[in-house]
Amino acid sequence: MSALRVGVLAYPGCFASEVFGVPDLLTMAAHVAGPDRAGYEVSIVSPRRRVVASGGVALAVAPVREVDVLVVPGFELHPGLDVDAMLASLSPEIAAIRSHAARGDAVVSICVGAFLLAEAGLLDRRRATTAWLFADELARRCPDADVGTDHIVVTDTGVTTTAAFSAMYDFALELIRRHSGAGVARTTARMALVDDARASQSPYVDTRVLPQPGDEFSRRVMRWLDQNLASRYDLAALSAAFNVSPRTLLRRFARETGRSPLDYLQSSRVRRARHLLETTDRSIASISATVGYRDAGTFAALFARHTGKRPRDYRTTFRRDARVPERGPDV
């Protein structure tokens, strides 16, 4: 087996860490595999002679060349960024991505690098993912793509997209697993302290930072539901609180938010439960009752459906000490 040729496409403003993250893990994997195993031939490529990445980091780049796998890093998609203007300025990179894919070679995006793949037309009629925070925007820009926020890595007919930032390691480990074997991937993950068992980004979604749809009516309904998490869901009582019929409430809430009040209530209950699991030692039964479920089994099933983990497993993964240390370590 010959060395796998991997090219990382650098462009102005791309995340420097996402340019080097995959090559660094592949370098570690090559050492783990040993000199008798086919390794990785990695290059940082660009259609430009000079590239300055995020943070003003100047990158040494080689001309775009034929590779087996082309990796497209993400960029800082901050509020106020004119994404259309940015993508328009990256027309040489978009052309390089399109040309690479036309040869039938694999293309991979990290995080919002998926926006470049979408601009190149590679996500049409394909399943894809990106950072959960920006998935709705990607779906809006690429309506012919099936954009999901569950999986961390999604591959559809030669095009791979990943979730946010650290998902570059999930992709790299899968690449190592296929090229160098499961044992090499497992050892590399242990050496790098990288989780090689993640399958979903659902446990990491924080709905508090997502834009909340809806007009004033639905926002008032949401506040009422948030203030009554432990109460039994009663559509008639909810409607009476806002002086409308149940049918009118459901219709207006769905029109403004795209969901039902019960669906919102369940997600709000899960959000509160996640916080309690992360920051307290309260029993799961107690937390279940606090968010409105007398049957802990029903609550656990709902929680797993929303987060991909049972409550006990979620606590094991995300438990943190709620106390803030008075001072940091001596340096």
Image (cartoon, rainbow, N blue to C red):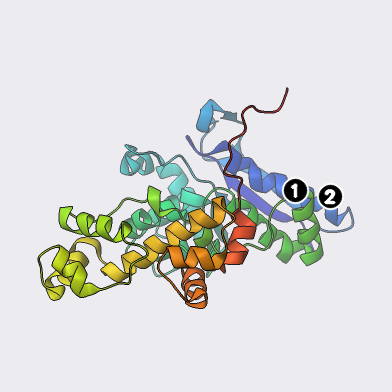
Residue at 43% from the left image edge and 71% from the top image edge: 293
**233 left or right, relative to 104:** left
For residue 220, above or below residue 155: above
323 displayed left or right of 128: right
Q: At x 51% / y 35%, what residue is drawn?
A: 48
Q: Quadrant of the N terminus?
A: bottom right
Report the amino acid beneath label 2. His
Which numbered mark, 1 or 2, is in the foreground of this view? Answer: 1
Q: Is residue 139 visible?
A: yes
Q: Position of residue 304 (x, y in %)?
A: 52, 70
**Mark 1–mark 2 distance (CA, rounded to whole Å):** 13 Å
**Tag 1 residue:** 192
Labelled pair 1, 2 in contact (Cβ < 8 Å): no
Residue at 54% of width from left, 32% of height from top? 49
Amino acid found under the numbered disc labelled 1: Ala
- Please report whichever mark, 1 or 2, sits nearer to the chain's N-terminal start: 2
x and y, in percent, of residue 25 in the image: 72, 48
Above or below for 234 versus 319: below
Residue 97 on image: x %, y %? 49, 52
* Callout 2 crowding tier (Cα within 10 Å): few <14, some 14–19, many ≥20: few
Badge number at residue 203:
none
Query: Between residues 245 and 241, which one lies in front from this camera angle?
Result: 241
Could you tell me residue 75's position as x and y percent? 47, 41
Horizontal arrangement in the rendering, residue 121 relative to residue 161 (left or right): left
> Does residue 39 appear in this view?
no
- Dividing the picture into quarters, in which one does residue 87 lie? top left
- Quarter of the figure that contains the C terminus: top right
Specify the label residue 31 is tagged with: 2
